[in-house]
Image (tube, rainbow, N blue to C red):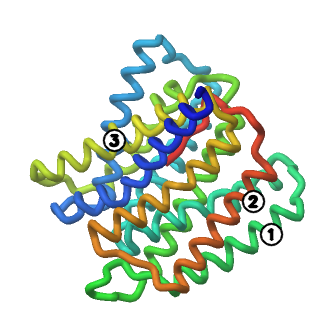
């Protein structure tokens, strides 16, 4: 029963993460630009995580860690949140979510470089599957069934950049996991990322629907999803949790199809399946059966 509860928490987190792209598209339709969406997502999520950190009295960090936290905020919030929203706008919610899951391949490469972790046969296989899968998805997707518009290279590039930045959460998590709780890390990196986003944002009047989308992205898809994932890790191995969380791009694709008319061609679905297969291989080969406090998701 405890294990089942863990799966339900992880599934809830995956469903909420899968809603990031569709909700972002709602904000776009209401006239909010991608980088402004990223800014408000970071700002409102900071209020949630900051309130939790203050309530739990976990607000102190070592001054020596501030430069690395600033770098984390730049890459993990400014670049990650910004590039993901642009990928959703230019390539569609389904494509952005699939390209996000190139992260395990990036993790394997960076772990080999920074932590001298060995590139095993399964890791090379996963890397190959990811590269071929990205190529197929890039050629076999459209952001809107009605227009069948060709994919933007900017959308593909930003999707891959989001996957790379997502992978950095593993690298930074290795550094901060034993030092701080996750809410402490987010208390610092979210406003830092917001500061970098601000010069690129033109703020304008927003409709009630836009505010609903922005608040939902922050509270449900960021803070809430992380909360469910972290609680799920208390009942489930990290490897099993990560595999279950790959429901995220499936949820994104299904919701984007019925809500926004997005679809993959058969070639695109093959590519998406290859990327998710690579994720499963990487998790099976590389993840340890325990979660870390600084582990985080999109």
Q: Can residue 116 be seen in this view?
A: yes
**Which picture quadrant has residue 190?**
top left
Q: Nearer the viewer, mark 1 or mark 3?
A: 1
Q: Do the residues labelled 1 and 2 touch (CB within 8 Å)?
A: yes
- Tell me which residue sits at (51%, 85%) in the image: 266
The answer to whether residue 41 is above or below residue 109 is above
Neighbour tally class for label 1: few under 14, some 14-19, many 20 plus, Cα within 10 Å:
some
Which is nearer the eye, 20 or 84?
20
Neighbour tally class for label 3: few under 14, some 14-19, many 20 plus, Cα within 10 Å:
many
Q: Where is residue 269 shown, x and y percent of the image?
A: 53, 78
* Residue pointed to by mark 3: 218
* Residue pointed to by mark 2: 281
Query: What kind of element bears circle 2?
Result: helix
Give the Cα separation between the discs numbered 1 and 3.
36 Å
Viewport quadrant of the N terminus: top right
Q: In this view, does 197 lie to the left or right of 32?
A: right
Query: What kind of element bears circle 3?
Result: helix
- The numbered dot on residue 125 is 1
Q: In this view, does 284 lie to the left or right of 167?
A: right
Q: Are marks 3 and 2 in contact (CB under 8 Å)?
A: no
Give the Cα separation between the discs numbered 1 and 2.
8 Å
Q: Is residue 67 visible?
A: no
């Amino acid at each position: 029963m405890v294990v089942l509860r863990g799966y339900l928490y992880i599934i809830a987190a995956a469903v909420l993460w899968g809603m990031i792209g569709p909700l972002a598209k709602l904000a776009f339709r209401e006239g909010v630009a991608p980088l402004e969406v990223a800014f408000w997502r970071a700002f409102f999520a900071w209020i949630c995580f900051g309130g939790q950190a203050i309530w739990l009295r976990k607000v102190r960090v070592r001054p020596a860690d501030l430069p690395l936290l600033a770098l984390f905020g730049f890459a993990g919030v400014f670049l990650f949140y910004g590039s993901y929203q642009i990928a959703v706008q230019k390539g569609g919610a389904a494509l952005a979510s699939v390209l996000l899951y190139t992260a395990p391949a990036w993790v394997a490469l960076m772990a080999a470089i920074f932590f001298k972790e060995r590139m095993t046969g399964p890791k090379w296989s996963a890397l190959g599957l990811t590269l071929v899968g990205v190529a197929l998805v890039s050629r076999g997707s459209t952001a809107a069934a009605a227009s069948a518009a060709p994919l933007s290279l900017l959308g593909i590039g930003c999707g891959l950049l989001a996957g790379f930045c997502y992978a950095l959460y593993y690298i930074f998590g290795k550094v901060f996991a034993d030092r701080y709780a996750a809410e402490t890390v987010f208390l610092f990196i979210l406003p830092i990322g917001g500061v970098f986003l601000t010069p690129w944002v033109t703020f304008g009047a927003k409709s009630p629907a836009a505010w609903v989308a922005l608040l939902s992205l922050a509270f449900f898809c960021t803070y809430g999803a992380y909360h469910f994932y972290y609680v799920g890790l208390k009942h489930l191995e990290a490897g099993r949790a990560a595999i279950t969380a790959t429901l995220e791009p499936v949820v994104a694709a299904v919701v984007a199809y019925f809500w926004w008319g997005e679809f993959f061609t058969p070639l695109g679905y093959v590519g998406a399946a290859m990327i998710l297969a690579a994720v499963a291989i990487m998790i099976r080969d590389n993840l340890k059966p325990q979660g870390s406090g600084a582990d985080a998701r999109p």
